[in-house]
Amino acid sequence: MLITLGIYYLAPWIRWDRGINAPDQAILFDIPNSRAYFFFIEIWPQEVYYITGILIIAAIGLFFVTSLFGRAWCGYICPQTVWTDLFVWVERILQGDRHQRLKLDKSKFSFNKFWRLLATHLVWIIISVLTGGAWVFYFNDAPTLMLQLINQDVPWSVTGWVVALTGSTYLLAGFGREQVCNYMCPYARFQSAMFDEESLIICYDELRGEPRSARKKDSSWEGRGHCIDCKICVHVCPAGIDIRDGLQMECIACGMCIDACNNVMDKLKLPRGLVRYDTELNHKLRKENKQEAVHIFRKRTILYVSVLFITISTMLYGLINRSPIELHVLHDRNPIFVELSDSRIRNGYDIKILNKTHQDKNYKLTISGIDDLDIKIAVAGNIMGNKWFNSLPVFADSIGHFRVFLTAQKQNNARQQLIFNVEDVYTKIKENSDSIFISSLE
Amino acid sequence: MNPSNNNIETQDDIGTTGHEWDGITELNYPCPRWWVWIFLGTIVWAVGYWYIYPAWPVISGDSERGGTKGVMEWTQYKQLEESQSEIFSRRAENLEKLQNTSTKDVMDMPELYEFAVVGGKSAFKENCAQCHGSGGGGAKGYPNLNDDDWLWGGSLKELSKTIKYGIRSDHKNTRNSVMPPLAAVMGKDSVTKVSRYVAGLSKGSSSTAEGAKEYKQMCSACHGVNGEGNRIFGAPKLSDGIWLYGKGDEQQIESQIKSPQHGVMPAWIDRLGEDTIKQLVVYVYSLGGGE
């Protein structure tokens, strides 16, 4: 809980130097400028496939963990669980344990009750505000926004998000709790598809526990199971189930019942693990008096791992080879070609050069596919000649638009293939794009 | 099974609504509390809404649309005006800059140039495309504005004059010229010869070919000694492959000599105003034929 909360609150404050022309926040979704930064990775809007990749990795990773360890995500990492645990912790500190809380709830209205309830809700709201507050730091420069927040000089969008997230945190973690998992969360519904007989789930060892019954002190264990029916496992369950009835959909595998039961077993001086993580298969094997078995390599896990591996390596390949230049060439559509007075043919193109680096750059444009090509480029309203092509300027981290006119004799091919090529004048890194030269209608 | 055993009513103290259909009765469970609260909430919301926004259709003399107005006096018209005025004020800033900048200087200012081209493009689609084609590609009788072959000139100044006052239009400053019907003066024979000669010009025939003499006499004053055209009269170049009417074959040339056709281009200054015309000039120039 502390680790996940820590990551959430501190991540936006990590700095990452990207040079003068770019923000130095390690994780930043810069929506006005449509850029996303993640440490060394920088994503432009047309590169959303990286996001798709991250989502695939996250999903398959989740499937993988689920098939091995059951609902480890739900029990330990899911924000809903983490914040609920945090809220319950606050509740426990201010209102005491379960018994005391129940008593408090039933008790008549008193000053004691009043301040405890008020304090709980106040602390909840403060946590919620901080949660919403931390969220907006991912979308703005954190230190700047912090100053703005202190000076109460923030854009309405920030206020809106903080308010919305405060509300949702307060409601979901304070009141929704396991209902969220039961009724709202889609993942809880379909994750049973990822389970198999060998997934780790929380099991009550009925061979050892049954027949259960309440036990007087010092009476013998003869003829009875180790479960003393104290119902502590039921009381601590945030999902409100009785684990002794077997695995149920509501179970989020948080392990609270394991801890509770182990405490009881310790007191009774019995071995721990009456309730524990185990697999369904082991359970069955034990019933049949066979050796327990754990297989990490199963068809299912191997499949998940290979999908993970493929996605991650494709992403890495893409990122490592991510070109700092992108070139788009758009052929004019209306008119598609123009016949000039000297009977030559002219075609017009819109070209865009994306400079993804943080330095201003000059690019050299070459076009191949037709000999004797007359190239002209329009910079604002002025048509420039060939010489200009050796250094088209594009500012750091932006897109250069140019209008290009190509003039040539009428070609034999009505649609002659062309290759546009831009080269960074200093680093010599190149980028290509195909296009065509149209000289007649057929 | 005895039906009375299925009757929960007997086991529960909830009671029925008293409605009965063919022996089936309805239990009288109360509505869920959260539901009731939301229901009451919507009523409160509605009252607040009536207070703030226009809601009830009441007949009232002073309002043209009738109905209660609400304290905010909100109307769709006002909302439209607001969002429009925002756009207008943003555009006005650029327009003012455009007014204070000569067309020539606009060409050196990337942002203003972009603004002019975009504005010109939309004005062109609205006013000019029906004759010149949506990309200015032209059609028979309507010149292509993308090429480098101009009847009257492709410089900013000439374009501006053409668009403002038109060609053979009813504006007093219009560009004007007439190709006279010369067939009667020339005689049938020489019309044929000249036509063949002119048709050959764009294919590179020499100036000593048959018909050259008659051409020099009758036509070169306007169309140039070598058929290069003359912008003072808006007389087209005859030595290239670009034709206003048809494809430049003998027949078509003959018909132009016998009964000359003339294009009419309306004057736009009174209809569109200086600002829009400035944008149009920049746009037409940007198509690639600007001089």
Image (cartoon, coloured by chain):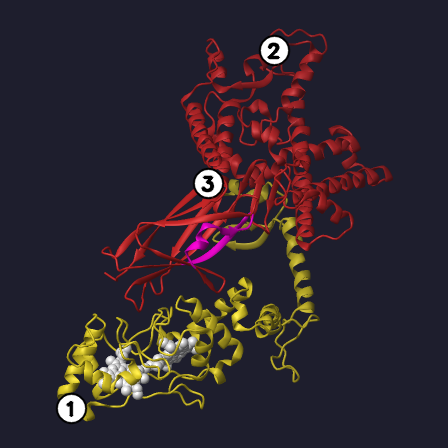
Chain colours: A red, B yellow
Q: Which mark is residue A224?
A: 2
Q: Position of residue B132 (x, y in %)?
A: 36, 74
Q: Is residue B209 left or right of residue B53?
A: left
Q: Are marks 1 and 2 on the same chain?
A: no
Residue designated by label 3: A428
Q: With respect to residue B287, does A192 lie above or below?
A: above
Chain at numbered mark 2: A
Query: Of circles 2 and 3, which is in front?
Result: 3
Q: Is A396 one of the magenta-colored residues? A: yes
Tell me whether marks 2 and 3 sit on the same chain. Answer: yes
Question: Secondary structure beneath disc 3?
Answer: loop
The residue positioned 61% from the left and 82% from the top of the image is B64
Residue range in magenta is: A385-404
Sequence-first tag of 2 and 3: 2
Q: Nearer the viewer, residue B189 or A136?
A: B189
Q: From the viewer's perspective, is the residue at label 1 or at label 2 nearer?
A: 1
- Observer able to see residue B240: yes
Q: Secondary structure at mark 1?
A: loop
On the same chain, marks 1 and 3? The answer is no
